[in-house]
């Protein structure tokens, strides 16, 4: 591979939707967030679609292979974290108890990736960028804004990611819970919460992607009108913002947040 110029190590850099219905999924998200799209052929009648804001790539989507749909794998959003050396991270992740799902392997000239399941069961991808560094617009409305790990064991999850990626952690007391901030160079880049008995037993550990929006209530109403299901209604988080959890018509879950922190 050629010399890599990547995003800073440990920063979330890309978001990718694997969906049961590419055509309908594309219509839902481009309508919801006013995104453009660039359909790039990757096979006969199969496309890797770059989702765009004002012509800049900010996320992507593709249709799940039929055999995975038949195996009843749900549609899902996958978060990517930038790393300096994906092969070194693969070895370290296995030593720390992760399961390697795919990779490390090159994605043409775009970069090199690894998909893994962490020791508590959450799936995430690591990305060593080459021609493709990741999202071209960060900290803007209608782009990925925050990433949050829901885990059955916050201690195991925290120890894994801090050892693998060099993250630091900080406990932030919130209403009825301790929220764990994950930091790079002292700056929060993600969060973590422990799943309680109130969560359904069959809900696995998972990374949630939050998209920044101008109005949470407007997006929630729009998503419902487009056929989405509101899983958590618009809810205020003191000093943070107003958020909602939404399931798209194909079954993938994501969140939106209207920040009050003056950072978008």
Image (tube, helix red, strand yellow):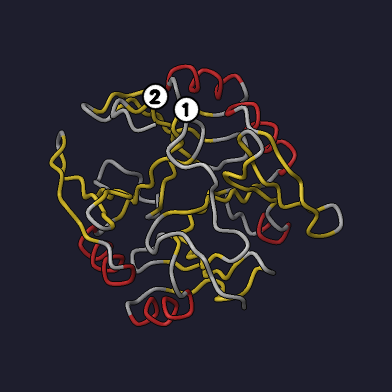
Q: Percent x, y for residue 80?
A: 48, 57
Q: Secondary structure at mark 1?
A: strand
- In the rendering, at what x and y percent does residue 177 appear? 16, 41
Image quarter where the N terminus lies is bottom right
Name the residue nearer the viewer: 262 or 107: 262
Structural crowding at the residue carrying mark 2, measured as other residues with C-alpha within 10 Å and reported as few (<14), some (14–19) or many (≥20): some
Question: CB of mark 1 within 8 Å of CB of mark 2?
Answer: yes
The dot on residue 205 is: none
Q: Which residue is mark 1?
A: 230
> Residue 238's quadrant in the figure?
top left
- Residue 202 vs residue 153: left or right? right
- Picture coordinates of residue 239, whole percent (x, y): 21, 27
Identity of the residue drawn at 62% across and 27% down:
34
Question: Which residue occupies the foreground of this view, 93 or 111?
Answer: 111
Depth check, front residue: 84 or 199? 84
- Which residue: 65% across, 48% down? 61
Q: Is residue 167 left or right of residue 89?
A: left
Quadrant of the rendering where the C terminus is positioned: top left
Q: Which residue is mark 2?
A: 233
Q: Position of residue 95 (x, y in %)?
A: 35, 82
Question: Would you place residue 131 above or below residue 21 in this image?
Answer: below
Badge 1 local density, few (<14 within 10 Å), some, or many (20+)? some
Check the image and name the residue furthest to the right: 44
């Amino acid at each position: 591979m050629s010399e890599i110029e990547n995003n800073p190590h440990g920063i979330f850099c890309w978001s990718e939707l694997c969906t049961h219905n590419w055509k309908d999924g594309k219509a839902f998200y481009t309508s919801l967030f006013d995104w453009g799209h660039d359909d790039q052929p990757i096979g006969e009648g199969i496309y890797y679609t770059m989702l765009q804001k004002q012509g800049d790539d900010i996320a992507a989507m593709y249709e799940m292979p039929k055999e995975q749909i038949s195996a009843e794998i749900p549609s899902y959003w996958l978060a990517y974290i930038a790393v300096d050396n994906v092969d070194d991270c693969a070895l370290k992740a296995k030593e720390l108890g992760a399961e390697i799902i795919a990779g490390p392997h090159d994605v043409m000239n775009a970069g090199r990736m690894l998909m893994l399941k962490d020791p508590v069961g959450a799936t995430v991808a690591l990305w060593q960028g080459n021609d493709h560094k990741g999202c071209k617009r960060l900290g803007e409305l209608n782009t990925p804004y925050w990433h949050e790990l829901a885990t059955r064991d916050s201690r195991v999850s925290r120890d894994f990611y801090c050892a693998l990626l060099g993250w630091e952690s900080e406990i932030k007391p919130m209403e009825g819970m301790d929220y764990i901030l994950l930091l790079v160079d002292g700056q929060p880049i993600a969060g973590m919460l422990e799943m309680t008995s109130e969560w359904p037993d069959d809900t696995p550990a998972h990374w949630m992607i939050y998209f920044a929006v101008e109005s949470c209530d407007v997006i929630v109403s729009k998503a419902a009108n487009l056929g989405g299901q509101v899983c958590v209604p618009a809810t205020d988080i003191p000093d943070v913002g107003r958020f909602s959890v939404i399931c798209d018509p194909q079954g993938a879950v994501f969140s939106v947040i209207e920040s009050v922190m003056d950072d978008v």
